[in-house]
Amino acid sequence: MTAVTTPPKKQAQRGRPGQSSPKLAYLPIIFLAFAIGVPLLIIVVYSFLEKPSQGTGVKWVFTLENYKALFIQEKLDGTTALDTRYIKVLWTSFYYSLLTTVVTLVLSIPVAMWIATRDARKRNLLVALVTLPFWISILIRTYGMRQIVADEGPIGKFLGIFNIEWSILYSPPATILGLIYVFLPFMILPIYASAERFDFRLAEAAYDLGAKRMTVVRRVILPSIRPGVISGIALVFIPALGSFLQSDMLGGGKTNMVANVIANNFGQARNWPFGSALAVLLIVLTLLFVLIMQGAAQRRGDKVELV
Amino acid sequence: MSEKYLEIRNITKVFQTPEGGEVRALDDVTLDIASGEFFILLGPSGCGKTTLLRSIAGLEYPDSGEIILQGERIDDKPPYDRPVNTVFQSYALFPHMTVGDNIAFGLEMENVDKDEVAKRVEEALEQVQLAGYAKRMPSQLSGGQQQRVALARALAKKPKVLLLDEPLSALDLKLRRGMQVELKRLQRETGITFVFVTHDQEEAMSMGDRIAVFSQGKIVQLDTPVEVYRRPVNAYVADFIGETNLIKGTVVSGGISLPGGNVLPTDQLAADSVIPASGDVTVAIRPEDLVLATNGMISGTVRDVIFTGDSVRVHVTVGDVEVIASLASYGTEIPEQGSKVTLNPEHRAARTVAS
């Protein structure tokens, strides 16, 4: 035993093991700030500018007309009236996204719970199967979907045997079906991540205390997987609100969602300022939704961070 | 204790192992538990004691046999239809509910009215000395407190049988001792029949009215703690309950020949020891039943001396075996390591046991 002991070094000087230098984070942060911030700034600025009399782009004159045009229509005789076209488009998008979220949620909970209760090897395989669609381009998958739901596709042919008419392509049901198909994995995966951590001994305890099957699900299992459910809702609802491929390819452009209208204004309609204003409105509504979700999550004391 | 309250009749449960083999967790187990009894299922891990407990709870369904509570078969009922409740080893408190809601959960399942629920939650918390903790979350409590909540949650249901699955195994020694006393008190006060699973023989002896010692899915011995300790039916029980020197010997005229040329006279063995006319036998002697003596019956060489405070444990090499004697800390001359000593069995507590 030696009497000499070295005093412990100050922790702050060295930093904890595994803690990397904050300097390494600067570059990605700068990149992300540019990649998100600059386009966002452009959109916001454009939304307050005038449309040039000819061609695309913007005229650098400040105006609020674009926002006014979202809700108010100017008639030929100079009078104004409420324009519900864009509100309707927003409502349609909201409605489709909500329906997609609800359906994927209802489908995902049993699937996630089932996967979570398999043994480790099977679990990995099943999770890999859920992520399998990510290996194929969404464009190709949506084309595939078009073949499947087509009047003369496999479903149509099968139902034809029973003389049931099947004609949903280029109509809202096809759009919604496409949305559900594309977003299902985004709902299953976060719920599975929560379900996998669920301690099934809690379910046993609930049975033991007199709870029947559905009560165990409702009062013990669902609250435990709530963080996954909230993440899943956010991961499905927000992108679904801004999706445009499904309504374009499966809805046949007849069932416009807000993203289609925005794209159209930047394309054929050549009205960048108006498209920008609509985009800003969509972003604001989305943010509002995120804040509501986060508020709900925080009230429950769940550890879910969406923003 | 002959009154039939909870009857276990010929319960067998076989598990399939992932390798394709079979494990008989319970092998034709039959036993009766009396009303108001503190009954212990004791054995090493994998002996079937937990499977029996889970079968009573309804979390496991036996392959064959019957479980009868107050004359009514319960083994075919789901867990929520059985008037029994479990305190789990992992506590299994619902993490998203407050302590009060955890306890209320079971009562709500019985459709007890709101005021009554609140009253019984408060009562249950008082019983486990956690009055005023109803609003806390389980994560804010210590392990010992969580354990009490789990107990309160089960007790609030006023079960006909309370099943406890190694409830104290996660607690440190001091806390465990305290809880043992408290559980015993609770059981006395509530009069509820307790079936308590443990692998800790000391816990079993200090708490149980009766102990069922399990080995490989079968009950080896069922008796009071004193009987199980004093009269183990075989070497397994003798070794598992408390500490025992198991010394192999041969029957000779007038006694048993032990290693190292020692002979233990028959009149030194417990009166009810079964001694065959000839052949090999195993002698069981508790360390505390051995004393140092001048010219004792068992001679050997001191290999180690370990002072534990309340006793001195002397490891003595006798022939080719090691014998441990636990001597009183005071009033004993502590022998030197390497010295020759002789030991005598006391109280006629040494006995032959079936191996």
Image (tube, helix red, strand yellow):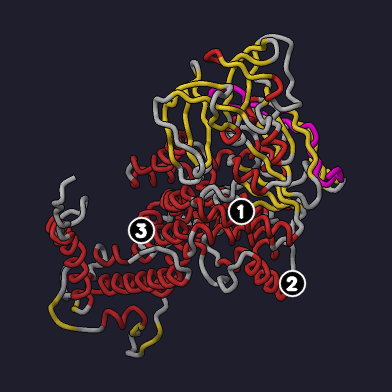
Residue kind at label 2, given as amino acid type: Asp
Residue closest to the eye, B4 or B252: B252
Magenta stretch: residue B159 in it?
no
**In contact (CB < 8 Å): disc 3 and disc 2:** no
User: Residue A128, image x and y in percent?
Assistant: 40, 38
Q: Which mark is residue B49?
A: none
Find the distance from the CA under tag 1 to the CA under tag 2: 33 Å
Residue closest to the eye, A212 or B17: B17
Chain letter for mark 2, please.
B
How would you classify the magenta stretch by its main secondary structure? strand
Where is mark 1, residue-wise? B180
Residue at the image position 18 percent from the left and 64 percent from the top: A33
Q: Are marks 3 and 1 on the same chain?
A: no
User: Looking at the figure, which quarter contains the C terminus of chain B?
Assistant: top right
Where is mark 3, residue-wise? A244
Provide the secondary structure element on which disc 3 rests. Answer: loop
User: Residue A274, image x and y in percent?
Assistant: 26, 74
Find the distance from the CA under tag 3 to the CA under tag 1: 66 Å
Residue kind at label 3, given as amino acid type: Phe
Provide the secondary structure element on which disc 2 rests. Answer: loop
Residue closest to the eye, B64 or A93: B64
**Which callout, 1 or 2, points at the residue further toward the start of the chain?**
2
In the depicted structure, whether residue B13 falls above or below residue B97: above
Q: Are marks 1 and 2 on the same chain?
A: yes
The answer to which image quadrant residue B16 occupies is: top right
Where is mark 2, residue-wise? B113
Residue B25 falls left or right of residue A9: right
Residue closest to the eye, B325 or B134: B325
User: Residue A279, image x and y in percent?
Assistant: 29, 70
Chain letter for mark 1, please.
B
| Segment colored magenta | B1-27
Q: Is residue A176 visible?
A: yes
